[in-house]
């Protein structure tokens, strides 16, 4: 029973239930993808044109050093920026993600 509730909570928090997720997200070397670190539709599937990034990418899972690697100062910098600016920071590195109008910015490209 308690286990079920825990699992349900996990689902609500977006931790994923269908598959065993590692503690950090890892999609391989993004810089080698079609758009580099900028998101393109073909790479982003169901996440494309959605503005609420944290819905699917819990903040604490992002930009972590892959296990067994030396801590990267660059990733630490990314984490700090996300900590300070939250979701507003995402587009500066990952592009607009197909979202026409930024959250709350009221227009402009
Ligand atoms: C509806 C869920 C969802 C939302 C909302 C979402 N994503 Fe994603 N994102 C995914 C999934 C699923 C993947 C795994 C890649 C795939 O689709 O094959 C992914 C992958 C990524 C990747 C790795 C892409 C690569 O090259 O492999 C980045 C970076 C990313 N998302 C950033 C964002 C940002 C920034 C936002 C908000 C603007 C966002 N996501 C919103 C679901 C989402
Ligand atoms: C200062 C630039 C920068 C900002 C700001 C930034 N990212 Fe990233 N992000 C990166 C880089 C670079 C990578 C690739 C890291 C790697 O391959 O090890 C990445 C990777 C990712 C990934 C793939 C999984 C991972 O952790 O490597 C996701 C998902 C993601 N970012 C989502 C977001 C979301 C959501 C935001 C906003 C809250 C955001 N990013 C803000 C630079 C940034």
Image: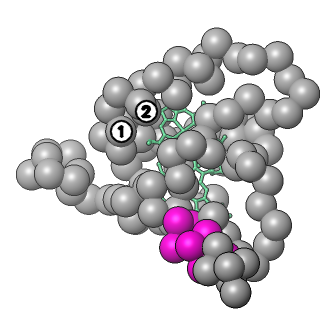
Magenta residues (range): 7-14
Label 2 within 8 A of ligand 2 by Cβ = yes
Q: How far apart are marks 2 and 1 (CA)?
A: 5 Å
How many residues crowd mark 1 within 10 Å: few (<14), some (14–19), many (20+)? Answer: some
| Residue 53 place in picture, x, y as percent | 44, 55
Considering depth in this image, is 77 or 96 the residue closer to the camera? Answer: 77
Task: Please name the residue shown 42% across and 25% down the image.
Answer: 81
User: On the picture, is 104 further left or further right than 1?
Assistant: left
Task: Please name the residue shown 14% across and 51% down the image.
Answer: 104
Residue 41 visible? The answer is no
Which residue extends farthest front? 2
Q: Which quarter holds ligand 1?
A: bottom right
Examine the rendered structure and indicate whether residue 101 appears above or below residue 48.
above
Report which residue position mark 2 lands on.
82
Quarter of the image holding residue 72?
A: top right
Which residue extends farthest top? 73
Label 1 within 8 A of ligand 2 by Cβ = yes
How many residues crowd mark 2 within 10 Å: few (<14), some (14–19), many (20+)? Answer: some
Quarter of the image holding residue 50?
A: bottom left
| Residue 36 place in picture, x, y as percent | 62, 38
Examine the rendered structure and indicate whether residue 38 appears above or below residue 106.
above
Task: Please name the residue shown 52% across and 28% down the image.
Answer: 79
Q: Are marks 2 and 1 in contact (CB under 8 Å)?
A: yes
Task: Please name the residue shown 64% across and 73% down the image.
Answer: 6
Report which residue position mark 1 lands on.
86
Residue 39 visible? The answer is yes
Examine the rendered structure and indicate whether residue 48 appears above or below residue 87.
below
Dominant secondary-structure state across the stretch colored magenta: helix
Which residue extends farthest left? 106
Query: Tag 1's secondary structure?
Result: helix
């Amino acid at each position: 029973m308690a286990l079920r509730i825990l699992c349900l909570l996990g689902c609500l928090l977006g931790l994923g239930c269908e598959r065993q997720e590692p503690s950090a997200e890892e999609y391989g070397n993004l810089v080698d993808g079609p758009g580099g670190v900028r998101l393109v539709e073909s790479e982003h599937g169901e996440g494309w044109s959605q503005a609420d990034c944290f819905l699917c990418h819990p903040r604490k899972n992002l930009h972590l050093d892959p296990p067994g690697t030396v801590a990267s100062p660059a990733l630490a910098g990314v984490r700090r920026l996300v900590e300070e600016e939250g979701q507003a920071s995402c587009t500066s590195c990952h592009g607009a993600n197909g979202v026409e109008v930024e959250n709350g910015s009221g227009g402009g490209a």
